[in-house]
Image: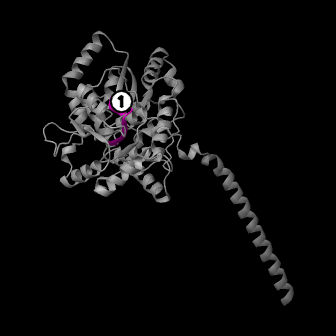
Amino acid sequence: MSERLCRSLLKSEALSNVLTIHEENPFDLVLIELFATDCPLGIASEMNLTTIGISPCALMPWHYTRFNLMDFPSFIPTENSPFATQMTFWERIVNFLTGKVMKILFRLLKIQEQDTALLKEHFGSHVRDVEVLGHEISLALVNQHFSVSGVKPLNPRVIEIGGAHIKWTNESLSEDVEAFFTSSPASGIIYINWGSVIRSSSLPESHLRALRNALDRLPMNVIWKWEDDVPFPNKSNRILVKSWLPQLQILCHPKTKVFLTHGGLLSANEAAHCGKPVIVTPVFGDQHLNGAALVERGMGILLPLTDFTEETIYARLMEILKPQYQLRANQLSHHFNHRLMNPLEIAVWSIEHILIEPSAAKFLQTLPVDFNYTKANNFQDFTPIILGIFTSVLAICILFIFMAISRLARKLKAKFV
C-alpha cells in the first residue's frame, strides 16, 4: 500500500503544482500524515522545509522509536488491539507480541526502503533515507487525549490534540430534526450512527430486526443515520432516518441520552466532548481500541456484532441508561474540555513556536534514538556491578572449596601416615 501511495503522490499533478509554487514563493513548513507512508518526508527534504507530523490515531508501534518514546506494552495498548490500559496477564502477553509483530512486519515489508527508492528515482540519488528523515521530524501532533485514551509517557515533541476537529456552531438544526427533538418524550433520544464507512443498511436482516425490536421496547425516540439508496424497512414515527446528520449538535443536545457508534476516534472524541454514554460496536482498525478505552473510562459498553440479539441489545440499552454512565460521561467531558487552550489552538501555537524559534525543535529532542530499553533502565550501568558481585561471590566460593579440600587432604594425610 505504501509503495502505491508513494507512486501516486510523486506522479500527481497536485505535487507538481506545489513544487512549482514553492520555487516562486517558498513555503515555511510541511505538515505530513503519520500513517501509511513516509514518502512525504523525502518531498519535504527536497523542499528544504521543517516537517511536522500529524497522526489521525494513536501512534503506530514503529513511531515510538522515531520520537524517542519508551513503549510499555504492560499498559500502553497497541494500535488495533482490543485492550485498554488495565490488562490481564494474557492480554499483556498478546499486546506485547502484537506490537513486536507489527514492528517486525514493518521492517520485513521494507516500506521505508521502497519509499526511499521511489524518491531517489524521482528526485535523484542524493535523497536521504526516509528512516533518517523520520527521526528529524520537529513535532508530532496526535489525535488523542489522555482523558479518553489513557495517560501515556510522552515527551514535549509529541503533542496531544484530540478533539481539534470539533468546532461548535450556533447554527440551528434543520426544521425536521428540530421538530423531532421537540416532539420526543422527556425520556430522550437514542442516536445511531456507525460512521461513513460502515453502512447501516449492510447489516444482516436478523441484526436489524433484533435492533428494531429492542428499540421498540424502550419509551424513547431514535435518530438513525441511514443511506439514501436503500429504503428503511418498516418506517416508524418514533424513528427519524437521514443520510446525513450534524452529529456534534445532535450529541450535545440535552435530549440525546445514548449514542450507538462504531467507535471511530472522531466519534469517540465527540461523545467525550458532549458527555454522552456510548454503546460501541467495533468493526475494524482502531475501533476496538477506542471502544475498550471508553469502557474503561466508565462511559461505554461494548456490543459486538456477534452479540446482536434482541435480548442482548435490550440489556445493553437498559444498562447504559443507568445514572452512573451519565455521571462518568460528564466527568470525562469536563476533563476532555478543560484545557489551557482548545486543542486546535494548542496545535497552532505549537506549529508557530517551531517556525518562530528555529532552535525549538532541537530543544524538544530527547535522548538519542539508540538510547534503547537497556540503556534507559540503567542495565548497562548495573551490569559491571552485578558482574563484580558475582565474580566476588564466585571467588569466595572457590576459595572456600579450595580451603575445604586442603583441610580434607591434610586430615587424610594425617590419618594414613
Taking the image as shown, residue 407 lies to the left or right of residue 105, namely right
Q: How does the figure colour the protein chain or chains?
A: one colour
Q: Please provide percent x and percent y for residue 268.
A: 38, 38
Provide residue 77's location: percent of width, then percent of height. 44, 47
Residue 298 visible somewhere in the drawing: no
- Residue at position x 42%, y 32% in the image: 273
- Number of numbered discs: 1
Q: Which residue is mark 1?
A: 128
Q: Is residue 102 visible?
A: yes
Q: Quadrant of the C terminus?
A: bottom right
Residue 88 higher or lower than 335, as above or below: below
* Furthest-bottom residue in this view: 416
Label 1, residues with CA under 10 Å away: few <14, some 14-19, many ≥20: some
Q: Nearer the viewer, residue 95 or 324?
A: 324
- Residue at image position (27%, 32%) is 180
Depth check: give the residue in front, 47 or 17: 17
Q: Quadrant of the N terminus?
A: top left
- Mark 1 lies on a secondary structure that is loop
Residue 159, magenta (yes or no): no
Residue 167: quarter of image: top left
Where residue 233 appears, as percent x and y from the top left, is 16, 46
**Region in magenta:** 249-260
In front: 371, or 103?
103
Q: Residue at x 84, y 83 (%)?
A: 411
Viewer-closest of 63 and 324: 324
Relative horizontal placement of residue 338, taking residue 283 as reference (left or right): right
Residue 161 lies left or right of residue 380; in this view the side is left
User: Could you tell me the amino acid type at mark 1?
Assistant: Arg
x%, y% of residue 389?
A: 71, 57
